[in-house]
Each structure stands twice: as structure tokens, then as C-alpha cells.
Image: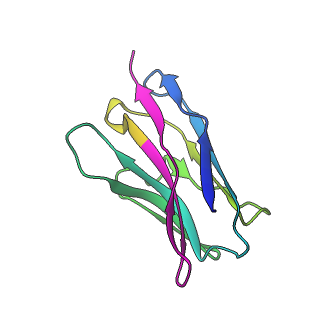
Amino acid sequence: QVQLVESGGGLVQPGGSLRLSCVASGNRFNFNAMGWYRQAPGKERELVADITGDSTNYADSVKGRFTIPRENNKSMVSLQMNSLKPEDTAVYYCNARHPYFGNYWGQGTQVTVSS
């Protein structure tokens, strides 16, 4: 059974940085894409950033502040978040996709940006 486990969330002051990590286990295949979504209270889940092969994609709201570092481990994805704002506060979910084997989600990790 495929599992995605996130780590790295927490409380940070505005302007600070956090790094989220997600490791997949139980998969006998390489994912086509991996990335991060977030859901703030009262809002729908939205894409933050993802990587497909060597191509990365970022939501307009995080461009220039968030980065998905390249990983040698194809079952791992990280999210480097800099210059954090209060509006970045949300539960962040790791996502991994394969066109045949399906779509997988982590359990979520809370990121709170507050002074």
C-alpha cells in the first residue's frame, strides 16, 4: 500500500522560512508527478507547486518565494518556503500521481504564519 508521509510544518513568523518534505513508501513504480497542495480554513484545496519530470509548476501566489528542490530520490518531494506570509497559513498536503496506478495524498501538515 502506497503511503505518503509529510514532515516539516510548524509555526513561523512572517518573513520566515520552512521546508516541507514528503517521502513515499510502498510504491513499486515511479510517480509521474509529485507536488504540494494546501487548504486554508473555509477554502478549497489548491495547488501550490508540483514537479513532472524536470518541469516545475507554481501557483502565482507563491512564485519567487517557494521552490521544489530537485531530488535524486524519485519517491521524495520537498517544498522550500521563503518569505512566508500570514495568507500562506494552511494545511499542506503532499500529492503523488501516476497515470495508471492513481492519485495519492499525504495526511497533511499544518503551516501557521503568525507573529
Q: Which residues are magenta?
A: 92-115
- As drawn, the residue found furthest toward the front would be 1
Residue plotted at (53% across, 38% down): 82
Residue plotted at (59% across, 77% down): 32
**Is most of the magenta stretch helix, strand or loop?**
strand
Query: Disc count in the image?
Result: 0
Residue 29 horizontal side relative to residue 101, left or right: right
- Where residue 110 sits in the image (x, y, percent)? 45, 33
What is the quadrant of the N terminus in the image? bottom right
Residue 85 falls in image quadrant: top left
Q: Which of 76 and 56 lies nearest the eye of the viewer?
A: 76
**Rendered position, 113 above or below 31:** above
**Rendered position, 89 above or below 50:** above
- As drawn, the residue found furthest toward the top would be 115
Residue 51 falls in image quadrant: bottom right
- Where residue 19 sits in the image (x, y, percent)? 61, 39
Residue 101 located within the stretch drawn in magenta: yes
What is the quadrant of the C terminus in the image? top left
Residue 8 horizontal side relative to residue 11, left or right: right
Residue plotted at (64% across, 77% down): 53
Residue 69 horizontal side relative to residue 46, left or right: right
- Where residue 16 sits in the image (x, y, percent)? 52, 27
Q: Which of 74 and 59 lies nearest the eye of the viewer?
A: 74
Residue 48 located within the stretch drawn in magenta: no
- Where residue 64 sits in the image (x, y, percent)? 48, 51
Residue plotted at (46% across, 21% down): 13
**Rendered position, 29 above or below 113:** below
